[in-house]
């Protein structure tokens, strides 16, 4: 049995048998903290700051709490009752949740700073990387996260209000990109009963085992197969999309060329291996080629936070932003990453925020 399964069994039993109970603080400090974003970083920061005795309000732009935990990750990877169970616990500990607030639009940064003594930004890294190729404006080409949010709402029995509505049922799908997001799209389009699906990778197929030049403890550069890949579809490696083609404004096919990656003077380039193009039929393309940091918003502009070269919110070693009393954590500062990193960042940012408010280090 894997460590993950052991840990999951322990915590599930703990909840079932009542070992996990709300832990509201014994005393309140009288200070208030706003946490913007209710993903893993925001929830982790909120819990720690609340237990330190501060009054914490979590603001979420969407209509339900959870951020990408709820609307970005498919149910076949994370069932949403797990999020609800945790939210119930946090509410019982005294945390206030406000949904449907686009901070910077519905509430200005100035109003936020007036109401709260500190702010923690956990806004994620949801600015998708786009493709600058001919035909990008054809109907039927969408960012992966736009599709995943809609599909998560459908699975939850919610009404999809977005336009256009993105569905893979009965369609020929091409997913551009080979990471976690691409695999999430793959599992969803198969469950929607697409007619066929291909996933395109720009890099050559990695080896099944470590190469000699990739020893432990380096990150293993090997072929990663997700459970969704065992369910259907095909993968094509070493293909770079060159253009989209369509009729009457609708996508009909994708053209790509086979390439190999080269690095010269520290710059990676992709060189065609031969001139022949590959043409793939498609009427739905999902772009899953990564993210470019936090979406620039009125809130971030009004707070005068800085950004690094990767588009992430700039922080110091204590997760503090340039403006006093403003902290940031999770994907917003490190780019799209793992949930465990977001949780760790949220706890660390809470520790620094508490020290800022109280003048002493109290949180772990």
Image: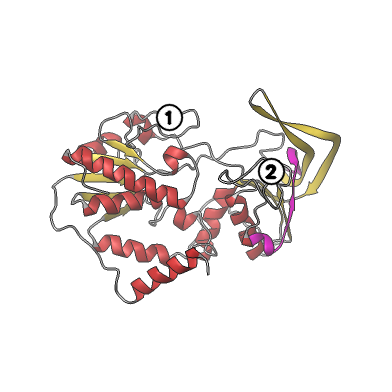
Q: Nearer the viewer, residue 31 or 1?
A: 1
Residue furthest toward the bottom? 17
* Residue at the spot of label 1: 307
> Label 1, label 2: how many angstroms apart (C-alpha)?
38 Å
As drawn, is 159 to the left or to the right of 40? Answer: right
Query: Is disc 2 placed on a helix, strand or loop?
Result: loop
Horizontal and vertical percent for residue 99? 34, 53
* Residue at the spot of label 2: 212
Horizontal and vertical percent for residue 94? 22, 58
As drawn, is 251 to the left or to the right of 18? Answer: right
Going 34% across and 52% down the picture, which residue do you hit?
44
Query: Is disc 1 placed on a helix, strand or loop?
Result: loop
| Residue 263 in sight from this viewpoint | yes
Residues drawn in magenta: 228-248
Label 1: how many residues lie within 10 Å, few (<14), some (14-19) or many (20+)?
some
| Residue 117 in sight from this viewpoint | no
**Residue 229 position by quadrant:** bottom right
């Amino acid at each position: 049995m894997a460590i993950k399964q052991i840990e999951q069994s322990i915590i599930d039993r703990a909840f079932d048998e009542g070992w996990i109970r709300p832990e509201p603080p014994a005393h309140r400090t009288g200070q208030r903290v706003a946490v913007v974003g209710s993903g893993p970083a925001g929830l982790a920061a909120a819990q720690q700051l609340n237990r330190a005795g501060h009054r914490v309000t979590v603001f979420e732009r969407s209509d339900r709490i959870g951020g990408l935990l709820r609307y970005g990750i498919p149910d076949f990877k994370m069932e949403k009752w797990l999020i609800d169970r945790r939210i119930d616990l946090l509410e019982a500990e005294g945390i206030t949740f406000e949904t449907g607030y686009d901070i910077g639009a519905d509430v200005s940064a100035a109003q936020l700073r007036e109401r709260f003594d500190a702010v923690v930004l956990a806004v994620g890294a949801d600015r998708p990387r786009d493709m600058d190729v001919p035909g990008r404006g054809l109907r039927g080409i969408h960012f992966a996260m736009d599709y995943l949010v809609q599909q998560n709402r459908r699975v939850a029995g919610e009404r999809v209000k977005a336009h256009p509505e993105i569905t893979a049922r009965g369609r020929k799908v091409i997913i551009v990109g080979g990471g976690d997001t691409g695999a999430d799209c793959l599992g969803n389009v198969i469950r929607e009963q697409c007619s066929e699906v291909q996933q395109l990778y720009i890099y050559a197929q990695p080896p099944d085992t470590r190469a000699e030049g990739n020893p432990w403890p380096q990150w293993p550069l090997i072929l990663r197969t997700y459970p969704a890949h065992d369910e259907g579809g095909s993968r094509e490696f070493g293909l770079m999309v060159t253009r989209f083609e369509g009729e009457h404004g609708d996508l009909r096919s994708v053209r790509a060329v086979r390439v190999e990656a080269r690095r010269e003077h520290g710059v990676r380039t992709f060189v065609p291996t031969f001139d022949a193009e590959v043409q793939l039929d498609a009427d739905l393309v999902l772009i899953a080629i990564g993210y470019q940091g936090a979406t620039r918003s009125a809130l971030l502009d009004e707070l005068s936070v800085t950004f690094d070269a990767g588009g992430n919110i700039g922080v110091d070693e204590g997760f503090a932003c340039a403006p006093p009393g403003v902290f940031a954590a999770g994907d917003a500062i490190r780019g799209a990453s793992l949930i465990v990193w977001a949780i760790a960042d949220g706890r660390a940012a809470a520790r620094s925020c508490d020290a800022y408010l109280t003048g002493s280090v109290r949180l772990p």
